[in-house]
Amino acid sequence: MKPVIIFITLFLLFSCKEKQSEHVVSQTQNVDKIPVIDSAYVATKTAYFKIKDGVIVGDGRTVLDTIISTSQFVMFGERHGSKNTSQLITALIPMLHTGGFNHTAFEVGPYSAKKLVTLSTPPSETVNNLRKFTSQYAGKEDNQVPIPFFDGLEDAYFLQSIREHDMGIWGLDQEYYSSTLYFMDELLSFVKNDADYTIIKSEKEQASKIIASWYEKEENSDTDIDLFTEIQKEPKVQQYLNRFRKNEATKKIIEDLEISWDIYSRWRKDSHADRISYMRNNFLKHYQQVVKMESNPKVFLKFGGLHASKILTNNCYDLGNLITELAHQNNSKATIINSWNYHFIDETGTEVNYLKKYAWYYKRLRDLMVLGKRDEWTIIDLTAIRDDIQNGRVTLPKNGDYHRIKSLIDGYDYQLILPLDTAVTPNKN
C-alpha cells in the first residue's frame, strides 16, 4: 500500500510543478504582450489649460477642480523662482478657498511666516510692503533675500490673494541663510518700550556690524567658512541675543534661529535629515492646533519638488510622505502635483529647451516631457497611469528609463509641464 501512496504523491507533485511552470510561461508571454508606456499612451492621460485674466480655463480646469474637491491636502512641488508658478498659485487660491482650504504652508521659517502676515496687512499693501522689506535686506545676488520665494512681484500677488481670502500661513522650514540681519532688527522691535532700549539698540548695531562682516568674509573667501558657528562665537552677538532668551515673546524666535544655523553649519553631516524632520514636526504642530477647531482641515502646501514626493528622496521621508500617511489615517486624500519647466527664457533673454539642455535628466522622461506646450499648461494624470500599470494594461520600459519613470509615478499624482516661463519679476528697488 505504501508504494502506491508514494507514487500518487509524486505524481501529484510533478503535475503541480508542471502546471506552475505553464502558468509562469503564460505570465511571461502576457507581460510581453502588454504595451510599454510611450508618448501616445501618456497623451490619453493628459489635459491642457490656460490662465486668462487670472482665471484657469480649458479641459485641465476640470482636473484641478476634481483635485481640490476630493483632497484634504494638496501639495504643489514647484520649480523655485518660476513666474508661471506664482501666477498659477494666484489663480488657484480662489478655487482652493471655495473648496474649503483655509490653510497654506510654505518653504519659509516659522517666524518669517508671521512676518509675511504683517507685510500683507492690509492685503492691498502687500506689494509695496514686500518691496520695501526685500529692498532693505537684499544682498547683491538674487538669492540673497530675507525671506525666500516671496521676493518676486508675482509672489506678492499670490500672497495678497491668500490674505484677501483669509487663509492661514504656516512656515515649516528653517529660517533662511541670508535672514540674520533682518532678525536682529525684528528682535529689537520687541523691546521698544524697554527702559534700556537705547542700550539694547546700541548692542544690536554692534552685533549687526559683526554679522555683516562675517557674511562679507564668507562671500569673498576662497576657503569654506562655517558662517553661523563663527557668528555665534562673537561675544557681542551673544550679548545681544541673551537679551531675548528669557522673554516669552522672543525666546522661541531665538531657538528656531539657532536650529536654522545649526542645520546650515552641519550640511555636510546629514543635517538634511534634521531639516526634514523639523519641517514635518512644524507641520504637525500647526495641524494639531487647527484640528481642534476643524474636522479634517484642508491644507495647501507649496514646496520644492523633492519635498513633495511621497517616496524616499535624499534618504528622507519628506512632507509629501507625511501628508500622504496623514490622509490615509484620516481616510481622506492627499494629492501631490509635481512640475517641470520645458521652455524657459533665462537671465540673458535666451530661450532654453530643458529637454535638450538637461538631457541627462529629462531624456528618460521624454515620453511625458514632449507633451508640453509653449502656450498652455500641461497636466498629466500619473494616478491613472499608476492604476493602468497595477492592472496590467500598460507596463514600464525595461531599459534604464524604468527607474526614473517609476520614481516619478510612485512619488507624485500629477505632473504639470509649464508653458514658456521666466523668472519672477524682482520686487525690490
Image (cartoon, rainbow, N blue to C red):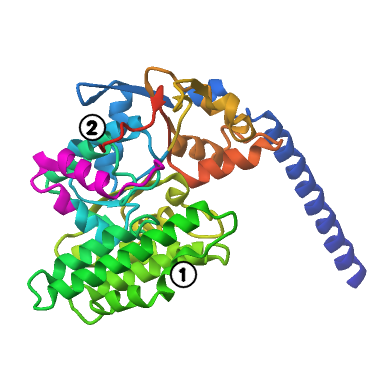
Mark 2 surroundings: few (<14), some (14-19) or many (≥20) residues within 10 A: many
Quadrant of the frame with the N terminus:
bottom right
Q: Magenta stretch mostly in which secondary structure?
A: helix
When the figure is inspected, residue 350 is found, relative to residue 250, above or below; the finding is above
Residue range in magenta is 117-142
Q: Taking 383 as reference, is 208 above or below it?
A: below
Judging from the image, what secondary structure is the residue with disc 1 in? helix
Crowdedness of circle 1 by 10 Å Cα count: few (<14), some, many (20+)?
few
Instruction: State the residue in front, 66 or 300.
Output: 300
Label 2 residue SS: helix
Residue 87: image x %, image y %? 28, 31
- Earlier in the chain: of badge 2 and badge 1, it is 2
Residue in the image at 23% along x and 76% along y: 244
Q: Position of residue 410 (x, y in %)?
A: 52, 46
The disc label shown at residue 230, or none: 1
- Give the image quarter of residue 80: top left
Q: CA distance from mark 2 to mark 1?
A: 44 Å
Q: Is residue 374 magenta?
A: no
Percent x, y of residue 53: 19, 21
Locate the C terminus by quadrant.
top left
User: On the picture, is 407 further left or further right than 156?
Assistant: right
Q: Position of residue 84 (x, y in %)?
A: 34, 29
Q: Single out the residue that lies furthest toward the bottom.
A: 246
Q: Which mark is residue 91?
A: 2
Give the residue type at disc 2.
Answer: Ala
Residue at point 60%, 40% (across, down):
404
Residues at discs 2 and 1 in contact (Cβ within 8 Å): no
Considering only vertical position in the picture, is 397 above or below 228?
Answer: above
Q: Mark 2 or mark 1: which is in front? A: 1
Quadrant in the picture for residue 212 = bottom left
Residue at 49% across, 57% down: 218
